[in-house]
């Protein structure tokens, strides 16, 4: 491409400070360095984790930052030493790398690559490695992906090459939300056929978890949310029953225990609230119930009475649905193309990058599942 080796000036949504609207700015994107790939972003969605960084947490990496980690695009150029990718490849950036070298990548038990996010910030590309600048300031590359930009630079260990025929405005959702929820049910909880499940929180992550429970053959799937507007969608993805905790005087774990003769086999927390994490665990049946934490928070501790675990329940977490991204994301793209998983149904709004603050507002108000923003034409 004519731009290879040159600095690209393009539009990006910059988060200058916490709790403020993003600002569309002209930024400079430097050419990719050793092992890096410069990607033209075609489509990106907003995930709650972007809002968490902007509005709720006290991020160590700080501001100004370019958020965004659920996207798809086309390789513009590659840096020295990159052999697996070339200009024109269709790709999905990964917030969790897969270096294929470390002890975690070599183990089939985990996707926690050593180069990955630790305590909430990406090590693969720290602020000092940022290739993005605006008004003379380095922009923090959120999650090592920074997809709220026309162009971004990502380390090759954090890029999945996907089928050239894949529609980027749909498969972008596999960069986080849908893979995360689906994998949490299928890979982490390992939901068994005939089982009873409960999914707490019905955003894209929770709905994808519902889809995963159904895919794995669950016979009953309770969908739990305080926003009843979410129930219809949950039914479309396979939920069989709906519970709004606000409709009951007693804890939702007690309601579920009554409805299931003792508790569910699997519970998935897809909210990011430590109180809900406790409810989800305590909704599980003693003996073998498994509760998977998917929701994101780094602000509070979780608590429960030890007897809950002593009685045989398991409390575990799931990061990116347990997928090793460079292997798992192309497989999920194939599953979508083969009509084994849904994606289109998660998209409630389509916008452009210039409308990013409207997309954030919709998510804050619980009025969307996913807003996909078109960024650059293909
Ligand atoms: P979202 O905001 O679209 O959905 C959250 C849902 O939870 C909403 O429907 C909301 O009404 C519901 N909710 C809020 N409080 C509730 C309560 N007390 N009880 C029941 N339901 C409640 O968010 P999302 O994009 O689907 O993300 C969900 C969570 O997953 C976030 O915490 C996000 O940061 C996290 N996440 C984790 C990973 C991971 O790898 N583990 C990846 C991506 C996102
Ligand atoms: Zn996400």
Image: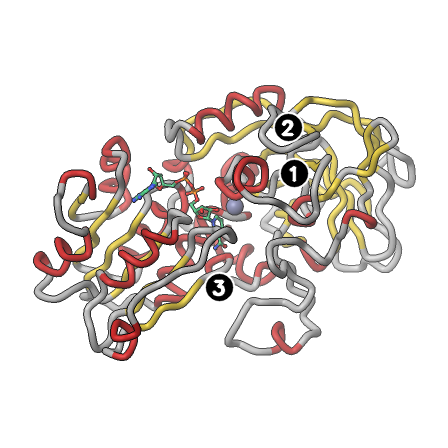
**Is 209 left or right of 35, judged from the image as shown?**
left
Which structural element holds mark 2?
loop
The one of 249 and 91 positioned closer to us in this rendering: 249
Q: Quadrant of the N terminus?
A: top right
Mark 1 near mark 3, Cβ–Cβ under 8 Å?
Answer: no
Q: Quadrant of ligand 1?
A: top left
Specify which label sits upstream in the sequence, 1 or 3. 1
Which structural element holds mark 1?
loop
Residue 375 bears which disc, if any? 2
Distance from disc 1 to disc 2, alpha carbons, whole Å, reads 9 Å
Mark 1 near mark 2, Cβ–Cβ under 8 Å?
Answer: yes
Specify which label sits upstream in the sequence, 1 or 2. 1
| Residue that extends furthest to the right in the rendered view of this protein | 5
Can you say whether 46 is above or below 252 in the image? above
Residue at image point 58% right, 30% down: 19
Tell me if mark 3 has few (under 14), some (14-19) or many (20+) residues whose alpha carbon lies within 10 angstroms of its own.
many
Q: Name the residue beneath numbered marker 3.
A: 322
Q: Quadrant of the C terminus?
A: top right
Q: Does the residue labelled 3 lie within 8 Å of ligand 1?
A: no
Tell me if mark 2 has few (under 14), some (14-19) or many (20+) residues whose alpha carbon lies within 10 angstroms of its own.
many
The one of 45 and 272 positioned closer to us in this rendering: 272
Q: Can residue 166 be seen in this view?
A: no
Distance from disc 1 to disc 3, alpha carbons, whole Å, reads 22 Å
Which structural element holds mark 3?
helix
Q: Name the residue beneath numbered marker 1.
A: 147
């Amino acid at each position: 491409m004519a731009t290879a080796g040159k600095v690209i000036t393009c539009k990006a949504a910059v988060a200058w400070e916490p709790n403020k609207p993003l600002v569309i700015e002209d930024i400079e994107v430097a050419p990719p360095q050793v092992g890096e790939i410069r990607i033209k972003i075609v489509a990106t969605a907003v995930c709650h984790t972007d809002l968490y960084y902007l509005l709720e947490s006290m991020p160590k990496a700080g501001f100004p930052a370019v958020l965004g980690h659920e996207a798809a695009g086309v390789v513009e150029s590659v840096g020295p030493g990159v052999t697996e990718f070339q200009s024109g490849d269709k790709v999905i950036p990964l917030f969790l790398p897969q270096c294929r070298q470390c002890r975690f990548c070599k183990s089939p038990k985990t996707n926690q690559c050593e180069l990955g996010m630790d305590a909430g910030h990406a090590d693969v590309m720290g602020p000092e490695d940022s290739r993005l600048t605006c008004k003379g300031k380095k922009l923090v590359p959120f999650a090592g992906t920074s997809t709220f930009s026309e162009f971004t630079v990502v380390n090759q260990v954090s890029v999945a090459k996907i089928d050239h025929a894949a529609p980027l405005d749909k498969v972008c959702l596999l960069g986080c939300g849908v893979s995360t929820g689906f994998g949490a049910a299928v890979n982490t909880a390992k939901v068994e056929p005939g089982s009873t499940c409960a999914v707490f929180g019905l955003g894209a992550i929770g709905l994808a978890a519902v889809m995963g429970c159904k895919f794995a053959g669950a016979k009953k799937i309770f969908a739990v949310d305080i926003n009843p507007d979410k129930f219809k969608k949950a039914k479309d993805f396979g939920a069989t029953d709906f519970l709004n905790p606000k409709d009951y005087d007693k804890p939702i774990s007690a309601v579920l225990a009554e409805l299931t003769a003792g508790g569910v086999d699997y519970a998935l927390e897809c909210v990011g609230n430590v109180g809900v994490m406790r409810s989800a665990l305590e909704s599980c049946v003693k003996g073998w119930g498994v509760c998977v934490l998917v929701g994101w928070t780094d602000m509070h501790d979780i608590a429960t009475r030890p007897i809950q675990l002593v009685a045989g329940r398991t409390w575990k977490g799931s990061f990116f649905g347990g997928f090793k991204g460079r292997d798992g994301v192309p497989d999920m793209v194939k599953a979508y193309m083969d009509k084994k998983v849904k994606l289109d149904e998660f998209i409630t709004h389509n916008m452009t990058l210039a409308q990013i603050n409207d997309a954030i507002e919709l998510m804050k108000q619980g009025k969307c599942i996913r807003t996909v923003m078109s960024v650059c034409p293909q």
